[in-house]
Image: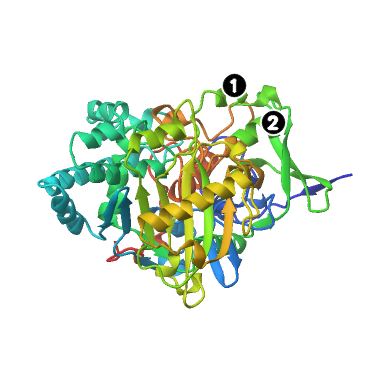
Amino acid sequence: MIRTITSRWKTENQGTKHSSEPQPRTAVVIGAGITGIATAALLAREGLEVTVLEKNGSIGGRTGSWEKDGFRFDTGPSWYLMPEVFDHFFRLLGTTAAEQLDLVQLDPGYRVYFEGDRNPVDIQATREKNLALFDSLEPGAGARLAAYLDSAAEVYGLAKKRFLYSTFASFTPLLRRDVLTRGPRLARLLLQPLSSFVAKRFTDPHLRQILGYPAVFLGSSPFITPSMYHLMSHLDLADGVLYPQGGFSRIITAMAGLAEAEGVKVLLNANATSIRTTPGPGKPRATGVHYTDASGASVLLEADLVVSAADLHHTETAMLPAELQTYPEKYWKRRVPGPGGILLHLGVKGELPQLLHHTLLFTRDWEANFEKIFGPDTQVPEPASLYVCKPSATDEGAAPAGHENLFVLVPVPSDPALGSGGIDGAGDPGLEALADAVIAQIAAWADIPDLAERITVRRTVGPGDFTADFNSWRGTLLGPAHVLKQSAFFRGTNASRKVDGLLYAGGSTLPGIGLPMCLISAELVLKRLRGETGTEALPEPAAAARTAHPADGAA
């Protein structure tokens, strides 16, 4: 039996509309990850009555939390970069990041171990200290890093002003002097890979790896990522790295509270199965979402606007008929997925001073490592370049007294066949064997010989879990990689070309991968709704704009 839920119009319209299209009164958002919650909050503040459908039993999506035996683990994102983007989002809702989060700066920002080298490099909290660090590792590198970071800051500022907050519904706003005068330089940055851009400026292999690694934040490799993205180094080497006390799930909790205050309703265990469309005067129009509730009943939730914050491949190929797909299966066969990931959540007895809050392990054969992940013949690198997060270094609530909390991420090919994980070794045997090898690698490289024996809590997650839990395309950890053909306006559109009233948000659409990009993606939905075609962030409410910035003096 199908039940129909019809939403009620929220009378106070708080936003200014600029579109000639009839404005929707009700909206359904698919997915209660950070993008879905953020989108719902902004739409509700705009005056819509919003319901969020979440297939799982809790909100947060990839930005989730898992607890056992006094350990609290973030299950996904763990780097707090671009603090001004978070603050801008909160200000759109009449508050600030300072009011919602307890942010602390990490000092050092992170540590890097290199294969075959017992001396790690600690990336510092300030630009000036990092200039001195680079100079100590390669004579003259400090001055070259200063020029590199100046360039990164300039490109980052231009990206925020002209590209990140653009829906690309119109290209006219891009025809500005600041873009046109930099045209030749931007073309070079788009066509040259990050790896060669860095190699022309630095000879020390350690420095090259440090400057190339931010490509992984973009779900890509420094050998195929455009050098435009050297802007990422502005974030960690100049701005510094922050951490929200209570973990990244605290961000979700704060946003969910704001969404609830705006009247958003979240339905858990509500698995969206298809998007309903009805004939229109031109294109068909989205008029609701069919979902299966916790009892297994099929339900239709009607709405004037549908926003999918779920995986775009799944939305297009599983929720729409072939004739209404903007991005059919043949489109995805030409796309480059970001990496998959093997995740480990480890509770460890005793202290681990060898590891900082953020620690990276880089293999010597850097290019071969990425080729195994992104090349034509994929395989799991062995050994692998990997990432270890120890939030208990900063957050007392992350682990019981006398213990440490470790989150390990191993980038691997995006292949669900690599398997699924489990608790205490209960995952697929092949994946658990890989996890054993990773633990041994950390123990050897960071000089923690008894690491395996000290583990009291163990949970693994694999690409198969990302497919099952998040309908992730090819089990990818993040979404489509930021190669040239999948960046900026090449990444696609956040509005269906075949169905009116159907918008997209999240890491698999504009503007891209990462928590800040997901928040911007939510704002792009609001810009589409208003018919805004400008490239800059939406104006903030005056009251919020007078509140101090949370990162003032901290980054």
Horizontally, residue 33 falls left or right of residue 452, namely: right
The quadrant in which residue 207 appears is top left
Binning the other alpha carbons within 10 Å of mark 2 as few (below 14), some (14 to 19) or many (20 upward) gives some
Q: What residue is disc 2 on?
A: 320
- State whether residue 540 appears in this view: no
Is the residue 72 above or below the residue 310 in the image?
Answer: below
The quadrant in which residue 125 appears is bottom left
The amino acid type found where label 1 is placed reads Lys
Horizontally, residue 411 falls left or right of residue 108, namely: right
- State whether residue 63 appears in this view: yes
Residue 397 is situated, as x and y percent measured from the top left of the image, at 49, 73
Element type at mark 1 = helix
The C terminus, quarter of image = bottom left
Nearer to us in this view, 126 or 370: 370
Q: Residue at x 16, y 47 (%)?
A: 146
Residue 42 is situated, as x and y percent measured from the top left of the image, at 54, 52
Residue found at the very far right of the displayed protein: 1
Q: What residue is disc 1 on?
A: 330
The amino acid type found where label 2 is placed reads Leu
Residue 481 is situated, as x and y percent measured from the top left of the image, at 45, 35
Give the spatial CA distance, label 2 vs label 1: 15 Å
Residue 425 is situated, as x and y percent measured from the top left of the image, at 62, 56
Q: Are marks 2 and 1 in contact (CB under 8 Å)?
A: no
Nearer to us in this view, 352 or 549: 352
Count the labels in the image. 2
The N terminus, quarter of image = top right
Residue found at the very far bottom of the displayed protein: 401
Residue depth check, mark 2 versus mark 1: number of the one nearer the observer: 1
The disc placed on residue 517 is none
Element type at mark 2 = loop
N-term-proximal mark, 2 vs 1: 2
